[in-house]
Image: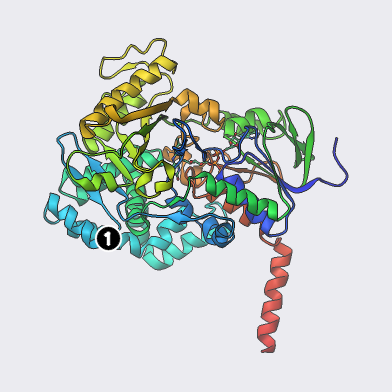
């Protein structure tokens, strides 16, 4: 079956943001790329659709783009994408928490306002906020460097050396201790007010962690800093505009993006990948790289044949663990949501509804023990606060996320819902969504009378929509410490190279993990576009010679 002349330089499996960014970077550098997607649409966990009612444009899965806008792919491709119609909108009110007693805490993009807000809850917390953010800022190159570097590489080693040079041995010891600290430990030793804890703790859910997990403190600080500095950008018209612009960029550089193409096998000969076989027949060959945006169980249990990789790697890939499951609820409303209390809540992009740090911790723990949480953290996204084009004038639209759910439900922590056989049936999904809706109605008294449409996606629906969201895990794999950082996707094969030459592994399951930053796609594009060592050495010699002549 092997073609004498390969069809493409690179074939990319899957069309998530990592694949699209990787393909765009390669295509722009002159590579002939082909991207194959098994579903009917490109974009993976980015999709915008009129899900509920005509004129209401919902971001069905992901919605918020600070990771993309703050990432390197955007830095490199942003102008090209803007030229293809992509425009980002932003807000000064990115997040808040609404508590059951009617109190609230807000975080804006203004350092002074945030200092005053935290002082309002406990005098002295404002100064603690300023100090904490200054400290993240001073080490931002290291903190964001860790999150944007191929850790098992010369770049990873040079980041470690520069950290030693800058911080010294003791400084490095304390920086690395900060990296593994839990969110609870950081919050409780930094801020006096429980309102401050409750403002920040829910954000660890967006990194796949819980507030008591290792490294959740580091993620809390980095996110707090990023939100204050960068707000909550979204593309005008919906997340799909990013996909559209990336696809246009790829195609403008001669690349090909195809849907309905389920890749079932990576073709390997002599320890080297040279193409893929598609389920409904056909082979696509690639001369320089096969890049797979899949989970480890799919890569090692489906796409590679027995014997392509050592059994120890294959077994470890098959044991890769998925994290908690997730539910989405989309509402179309006849009027804008009116929050009880501060009117700024109605202008805030993401409001978390939770009793606070202990509430998040309890709900995470219940989900991890197989229970429907009694009082889940409700992530209330309000995209219309930034982009009015998402719904007809005068209407409301909510994007709700519930990140503390089990895949197999053993029971209901509140003792109210009969969970049946524990699978996510339509009835279980709707009854759990009803509970969330009535809790929300305590903060939004006119919610229930203004609902025009509601669409709920259970963990089972997420898995059915995208094979990478296995078990309804929005982050394609647990981010527990042993599957994170230098151990992602798993300790026996960390990073993006695989035991098969020219076969690369990208996607949320791989480092730097989930989110719209396109980190893994960018790192692999870097790797592929880097000149081979011989050329690099020749380049260095040439530079030395030129310097000698000067
Ligand atoms: C509900 C939800 C909300 C989220 N909200 C946010 C948010 O607001 N902000 C944020 O930054 N992140 C968010 N995330 C996380 C973020 O969206 C994902 O981590 C990211 O989009 C994953 O991108 P990816 O490149 O890994 O691939 P994915 O988007 O998972 O796409 C992978 C694609 O590969 C395809 N594929 C897999 N196997 C094959 C095969 N064998 N052949 C062909 N095609 C294949 C799949 O069909 C899929 O389309 C959210 C995730 C979810 C699920």
Q: Nearer the viewer, residue 317 or 1?
A: 1
Q: Respond yes or no on whether mark 1 lies under 8 Å from ligand 1.
A: no
Q: Position of residue 496 (x, y in %)?
A: 60, 46
Q: How many marks?
A: 1
Does residue 25 appear to the left or right of 163 in the view shown?
Answer: right
Furthest residue toward bottom: 550
Q: Position of residue 83 (x, y in %)?
A: 58, 60
Decide: is 547 above or below 15. Answer: below
Q: Position of residue 389 (x, y in %)?
A: 43, 46
Q: Say which quadrant the C terminus sits in.
A: bottom right
Decide: is 220 above or below 327. Answer: below
Q: Nearer the viewer, residue 483 or 25?
A: 25
Residue at 58% over, 53% down: 523
Q: Position of residue 184 (x, y in %)?
A: 26, 42
Corner quadrant of residue 98: top left
Decide: is 168 above or below 440. Answer: below
Furthest residue toward front: 393
Q: Is residue 156 visible?
A: no
Q: Is residue 305 visible?
A: yes
Q: Secondary structure at mark 1?
A: loop
Corner quadrant of residue 77: bottom right
Coloring basis for residues: rainbow
Residue at 64% over, 42% down: 498
Corner quadrant of residue 199: top left
Instruction: Rate crowding at label 1 as few (under 14), some (14 to 19) or many (20 or more) other CA atoms within 10 Å.
Output: few
Q: Say which quadrant the N terminus sits in.
A: top right
Furthest residue toward right: 4
Q: Which residue in the structure is indicated by mark 1? A: 110
Residue at 61% over, 41% down: 15
Q: Nearer the viewer, residue 86 or 114?
A: 86
Does residue 47 appear to the left or right of 285 in the view shown?
Answer: left
């Amino acid at each position: 079956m092997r073609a004498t002349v390969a069809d493409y330089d690179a074939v990319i499996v899957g069309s998530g943001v990592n694949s699209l960014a990787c393909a765009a970077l390669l295509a722009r550098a002159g590579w002939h790329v082909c991207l194959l997607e098994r579903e009917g649409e490109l974009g993976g966990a980015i999709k915008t659709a009129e899900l509920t009612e005509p004129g209401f444009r919902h971001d069905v899965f992901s919605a918020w783009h600070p990771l993309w806008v703050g990432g390197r792919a955007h830095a490199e491709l942003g102008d090209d994408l803007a030229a293809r119609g992509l425009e980002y909108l932003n807000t000064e009110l990115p997040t808040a928490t609404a508590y059951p007693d009617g109190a609230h805490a807000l975080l804006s993009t203004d350092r002074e306002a945030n200092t005053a807000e935290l002082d309002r809850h406990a005098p002295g917390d404002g100064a603690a906020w300023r100090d904490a953010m200054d400290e993240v800022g001073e080490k931002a190159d290291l903190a964001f460097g860790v999150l944007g570097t191929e850790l098992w590489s010369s770049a990873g080693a040079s980041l470690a050396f520069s950290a030693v040079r800058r911080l010294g041995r003791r400084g490095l010891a304390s920086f690395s201790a900060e990296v593994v600290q839990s969110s609870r430990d950081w919050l409780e030793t930094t801020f006096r007010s429980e309102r401050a804890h409750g403002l920040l703790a829910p954000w660890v859910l967006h990194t796949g962690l819980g507030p008591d997990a290792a490294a959740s403190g580091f993620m809390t600080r980095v996110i707090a800093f990023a939100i204050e500095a960068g707000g909550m950008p979204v593309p005008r018209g919906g997340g799909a505009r990013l996909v559209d612009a990336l696809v246009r960029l790829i195609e403008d550089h001669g690349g090909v993006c195809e849907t309905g193409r389920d890749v079932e096998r990576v073709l390997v000969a002599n320890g080297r990948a040279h193409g893929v076989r598609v389920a409904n027949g056909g082979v696509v060959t690639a001369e320089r790289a096969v890049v797979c945006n899949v989970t480890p169980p799919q890569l090692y249990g489906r796409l590679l044949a027995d014997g392509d990789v050592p059994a120890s790697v294959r077994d470890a890939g098959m044991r890769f663990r998925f994290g908690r499951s997730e539910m989405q609820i989309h509402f179309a409303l006849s009027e804008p949501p009116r929050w009880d209390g501060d009117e700024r809540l109605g202008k805030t992009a993401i409001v978390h509804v939770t009793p606070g740090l202990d509430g998040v911790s309890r709900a995470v723990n219940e989900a991890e023990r197989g229970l429907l949480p009694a009082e889940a953290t409700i992530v209330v996204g309000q995209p219309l606060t930034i982009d009015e084009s998402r719904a007809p004038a005068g209407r409301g639209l909510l994007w709700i996320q519930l990140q503390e759910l089990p895949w197999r439900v053993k029971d209901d922590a509140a003792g109210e819902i009969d969970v049946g056989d524990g699978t996510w049936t339509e009835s279980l999904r709707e009854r759990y969504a009803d509970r969330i809706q009535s809790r929300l109605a305590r903060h939004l008294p006119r919610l229930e009378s203004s609902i025009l449409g509601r669409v709920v996606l259970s963990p089972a629906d997420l898995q059915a929509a995208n094979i990478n969201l296995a078990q309804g895990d929005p982050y394609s794999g647990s981010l527990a410490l042993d599957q994170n950082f230098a151990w992602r996707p798993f300790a026996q094969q960390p990073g993006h190279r695989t035991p098969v030459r020219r076969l690369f592994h990208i996607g949320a399951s791989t480092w730097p993990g989930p989110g719209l930053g396109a980190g893994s796609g960018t790192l692999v594009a870097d790797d592929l576009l880097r000149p081979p060592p011989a050329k690099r050495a020749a380049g260095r010699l040439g530079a030395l010679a030129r310097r000698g002549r000067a």
